[in-house]
Amino acid sequence: MTGREDEHHPRRLSLGDRVPLRWRKSVPWHRQGSTWRDAKPAVIAQALNRATALHSGNWYAVAASREIPSAKPFGINVSGTEVVVWRDQTGRLKAGAGSCPHLGAPLRDSPVVCGTLVCHWHGLALEGGPFAGWAPYPVHDDGVLVWVRLDALGGEEPLEEPVLPVRPGLADSVAAVYTAVGTCEPEDIIANRLDPWHGAWFHPYSFVDLTVDDAAGHDDGFAVDVSFKVAGRAVVPVRAVFTTPEPRTVVMHITEGEGATSVVETHATPLQPDPLGRPRTAVIEAVIATSNRPGFAVARAAAPILRPLMRRTAGRLWRDDLAYAERRWTLRSNGTFPG
């Protein structure tokens, strides 16, 4: 950030470094600098191509770790592959085909009894190991998200663990996960996140003064200077770097400013098509927030209250961004997408 104190750049409050807010002179939405010349379709497409060429090891993010308790299973259909995930008596995750090998019952609707998944149709019990006609899947809990490895679906050389970005320590942060589903493909979600230029125009209630630093030298992503709106003219300026560690993930790292080292991970998981045959994709977004300010310890203690607020903020953004991604898929599917 340049630190200039004109109508486009925020001014520090008198409380100094104890308060990370800046005052910003109000600028009408339509008078902010346009970004369409910089948001070149070829640049976004090039970034998307780099992302889709990466290796995932056949791992798919399926849920928040907190979504899978010990009392019941979690089910998801990943691009036509039924998956069920549950925890055994020690809390360890188990995963496998979501259809009972006996007569095809949906195992997502069956109870977990003492760590064993018991089919509610005829009582077939699965402990997580191979059973006649039923195959387990590798599963990974990273403390925030649950991943399942589907080798037949992914078709890549498998990896022992999913490709994860650098995160702040979970003991020193607050994590929340928001999930939504859109009528589009994973590439539409990833392309949305690889277009940082739309932020202040499409989300003026959250972002102002957004500029993309073309000289930052991030070949695999974008460096962005942006201010998050707090209330009225008060904003929090940060620098964020967007990168793609694997083909279905975009990560925003806060590198400078309040909450440095915090991350926002956006994962796109393909789901079963809808009844009309249109693609569906789950957006699973993990916000892992941290701060070196002494008061953040209070925030961590209030995590059960903060998480719903964090999910609500993510939900507001994704109501708009899913419309963006769905529109992109519609244009692509009928051959009218520009570029």
Image (cartoon, grey):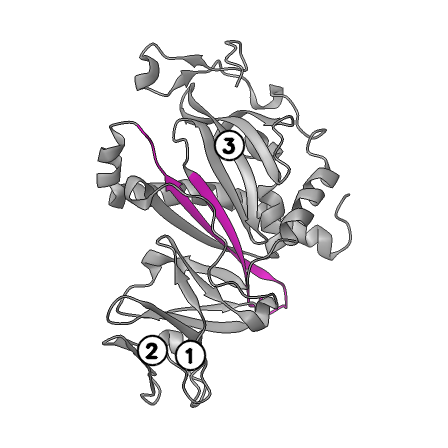
Q: Which quadrant of the structure image shows residue 146?
A: bottom left
Q: Is residue 20 left or right of residue 97?
A: left
Q: Callout 1: few (<14), some (14-19), or many (20+) C-alpha neighbours within 10 Å? A: some
Residue drawn at x 48%, y 58% is 162
> Judging from the image, what secondary structure is the residue with disc 1 in?
loop
**Nearest the camera: 51 or 86?**
51
Q: Magenta part mainly helix, strand or loop?
A: strand
Q: Which mark, residue 106?
A: 1
Q: Residue at x 76, y 44 (%)?
A: 338
Q: Is residue 306 visible?
A: yes
Mark 2 element type: loop
- From mark 1 to mark 3, how far is it between C-alphas? 43 Å
Q: Is residue 326 visible?
A: no
| Amino acid marked by disc 1 | Pro
Q: Mark 3 or mark 2: which is in front?
A: 3
Callout 3 amino acid: Ala
Q: Which residue is mark 2?
A: 110
The disc at residue 240 is 3
Choose between 231 and 187: the one closer to the eye: 187
Residue 273: horizontal and vertical position, in percent?
A: 59, 67
Q: Earlier in the sequence, mark 3 or mark 2?
A: 2
Other residues around mark 3 within 10 Å, as few (<14) / some (14–19) / many (≥20):
many
